[in-house]
Amino acid sequence: GSVRVPAAFCGICGFKPGSLRSSFRGSYSSTAGQSGVAAAAGPMCRSVAGLEAVMRVVTGPTMHALDASVPPLPWDDAEFASRTPLRIGFYIADGFIPATPACARAVREACGLLSIRGHEIIP
């Protein structure tokens, strides 16, 4: 929730890419050396267009040269603009901690909207 929760409380958009998708150079952690749970740095912006602009920069062709821990995988305009339906997996309960009723409802509603738009939803 380090991106999702603050963005939601502020009424803005947040995007948390996979770990090591953007550089951690210049940032510090209270858990130096932690490698069991890989963190992911992600932007928060006023709009999805803003998120796209930031991700174009942080995944740009020079980022890998600046920080070798970032994979040389540049932004793919074709993938971002694709209208091909997606296969989206989800879960509401992980078998350890039950979701709150509000969270479970939010996931079900999101799945319904994604399904209406033609995406394949896989529990």
Image (spheres, rainbow, N blue to C red):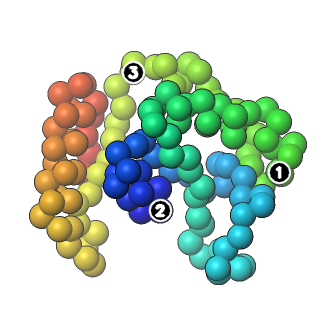
Vertical placement of residue 5 versus 31, above or below: above
Question: Could you tell me which residue is drawn at 44 percent across and 33 percent down?
Answer: 47
Rounded to the nearest whole Å, what is the CA distance between mark 3 and mark 2? 30 Å
Contact, mark 3 vs mark 1 (Cβ under 8 Å): no
Please indicate whether residue 59 sits to the left or right of residue 84 in the image.
Answer: right
Element at label 1: loop
Q: Looking at the picture, which amino acid does disc 1 mark?
A: Asp
Question: Could you tell me which residue is drawn at 65 percent across and 80 percent down?
Answer: 31
Please indicate whether residue 64 sits to the left or right of residue 21 in the image.
Answer: right
Q: Looking at the picture, which amino acid does disc 3 mark?
A: Thr
Number of the front mark, 2 or 1: 2
**Which comes before the other along the chain, label 2 or label 1?**
2
| Residue 74 quadrant | top right
Rounded to the nearest whole Å, what is the CA distance between mark 3 and mark 1? 33 Å
Contact, mark 2 vs mark 1 (Cβ under 8 Å): no
Number of the front mark, 3 or 2: 2
Please indicate whether residue 104 sits to the left or right of residue 5 in the image.
Answer: left
**Which comes before the other along the chain, label 3 or label 2?**
2
Residue 7 in percent (x, y) is at 41, 51
The residue singled out by tag 2 in the image is 2
Residue 117 in percent (x, y) is at 23, 25
Q: Does any portion of residue 17 appear in the rendered image?
A: no
The label on residue 84 is 3
The label on residue 67 is 1
Question: Could you tell me which residue is drawn at 64 percent across and 79 percent down?
Answer: 30
